Amino acid sequence: MESLDNISEEQQDILKELANIGVGNAVTALSSMLDDERIDMEVPVVKVVPLQDVPESFGDPENTVTATFCEAESPSFGLVLVFVMPLDAAQNMISKIMPDRSENLGEMERSLLMELGNIITGSYLSALSFLTGLTFHASPPRLGIDMAGAVLGTVIAETKTVDDQLILLKTCLNLESGGIEGSVLILPDSGSLLTLFRHLGAI
């Protein structure tokens, strides 16, 4: 299988464009969730990484993270979109939206995390549709809360076989009340990362 260990400048630029469009799509919806609080989003890291290196990209692989993920199918290929946040960042976001919540992650808190993840992954999926001209049909979001390595294993186990490389887009949400970091992962079906780049016009 061809490798994308060293992506070209053109491929880097198209990933940045994807990230910027995805961020733009997300800001309005997130702002409404936060009572129109001003939000600035940026994507400081955009790269293709080996699957086994992903847990370390979140810091200590034994730290607990939340991951909202969905499968998306197009006529040409499928992929999995994942939004990952450290647990403390997820707790902070929940507290901003639900100030009177308890410390436990109950049904309401989990539902909120899924809605947040759905907004982020849906924003990037819309960006992919815009750039590729393809229509994607997404599954309902699912939520995993575990150590980074374990939660990624859950995503892989519950979805179709994915490639051994994926697209990593680190995101920073800068709110008036503080910053929150997260990451968007795009995991194409096995062997279709190059197909994705072809549809993006970068091969």
Image (cartoon, rainbow, N blue to C red):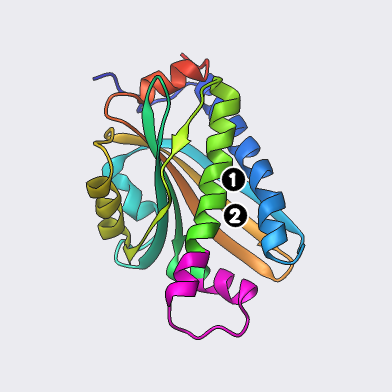
The reply to whether residue 30 is in sight is yes
Quick check: 48 above or below 118? above
Q: What residue type is disc 1 on?
A: Val
> Which quarter shows the N terminus?
top left
157 in magenta: no
Q: Tell which circle, 2 or 1, labels the residue nearer the N-terminal end.
A: 1
Where in the figure is residue 168, as x and y percent of width and height? 44, 42
Asked whether residue 109 is drawn in magenta, I would say yes
Toward the viewer: 51 or 77?
A: 77
Within 10 Å of disc 1 (Cα), the crowding (few <14, some 14-19, many 20+) is some
Q: Which residue has dot 2 on it?
A: 172
Label 2 sits on a secondary structure element that is strand
- The answer to whether 4 appears left or right of 134 in the picture is left
- Residue on which disc 1 sits: 43
| Marks 2 and 1, how far apart at CA | 6 Å
Tag 2 and tag 1, C-beta contact below 8 Å: yes
Q: Is residue 66 left or right of residue 164?
A: right
Extent of the magenta region: 91-112
Residue 88: in sight, yes or no? Answer: no
44 over 143 or under it: above or below: above
Residue 122, quarter of picture? top right
Q: Give the residue drawn at x 51%, y 73%.
A: 91
Q: Which residue corresponds to the image point at 44% horizontal and 65% vertical from the top-left?
A: 86
87 sits to left or right of 10: left
Q: Which mark is residue 161?
A: none
Q: Amino acid at mark 2?
A: Cys
